[in-house]
């Protein structure tokens, strides 16, 4: 399958926990991020073509916030290299300018330099 990504994925030095906004249940851990999307690692496969209402606690205050709320649509899900986990790619939806500032801050301040 050809790579469709326009922006390089950035792995973070933290595996931030991502929760379902409606139930507060853990959905998965943020593995990597671009301004357009994220990859989560979870113990259960996430359904594809599903829109998730999410939130995560930030590693530090950004733009006066300790938490980022966002909406994302799952595009694909597959087993991780570790057979106990699954990886899911999600496309960020309706991100505000403030959300994009926070995401870019995560990438620049907490991403691996590669």
Image: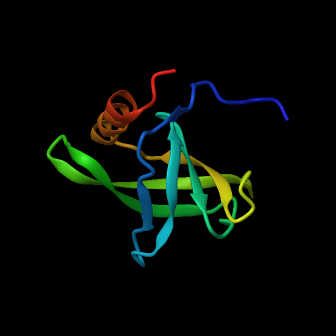
Q: Quadrant of the N terminus?
A: top right
When the figure is inspected, residue 88 is found, relative to residue 22, above or below; the finding is above
Residue 69 point in image, percent of width and height: 34, 56
Residue drawn at x 42%, y 59% is: 17
In the displayed orientation, state which residue is furthest to the bottom: 23
Q: Is residue 62 left or right of residue 103?
A: left
Residue at the location (45% across, 63% down)?
53
Snapshot quadrant of residue 48: bottom right
Colour scheme shown: rainbow
Give the total of numbered labels.
0
The percent position of residue 40, horizontal first and vertical second, equals: 56, 53
Q: Is residue 64 above or below residue 112?
A: below
Q: How far across and how far down the image is residue 100, in percent?
A: 35, 36
Is 30 placed above or below 97 here? Answer: below
Front one among 95 and 39? 39
Between 91 and 62, which is closer to the camera in this rendering? 62
Residue at the extreme right of the image, as rendered: 1
Q: Residue furthest top?
A: 114
72 or 12, which is in the foreground?
A: 12
Q: Position of residue 103 (x, y in %)?
A: 37, 38
Quarter of the figure with residue 82: bottom right
Say which quarter of the image contains residue 62. Answer: top left
Q: In the figure, is residue 81 to the left or right of 98?
A: right
Residue at position x 65%, y 54% in the image: 88
In the rendered structure, the answer to whether residue 45 lies left or right of residue 2 reads left
Left or right position of 112 against 109: right
């Amino acid at each position: 399958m050809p790579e469709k990504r326009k922006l390089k994925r950035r792995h973070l030095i933290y595996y931030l926990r991502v929760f379902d906004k409606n139930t507060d249940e853990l959905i998965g851990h943020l593995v990597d991020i671009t301004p357009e999307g994220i990859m989560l690692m979870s113990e259960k496969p996430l359904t594809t073509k599903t829109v998730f209402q999410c939130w995560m606690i930030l590693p530090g205050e950004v733009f006066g916030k300790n938490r980022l709320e966002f909406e994302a649509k799952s595009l694909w899900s597959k087993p991780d290299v570790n057979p106990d986990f699954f990886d899911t790619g999600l496309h960020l939806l309706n991100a505000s300018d403030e959300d994009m500032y926070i995401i870019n801050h995560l990438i620049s301040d907490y991403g691996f330099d590669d």
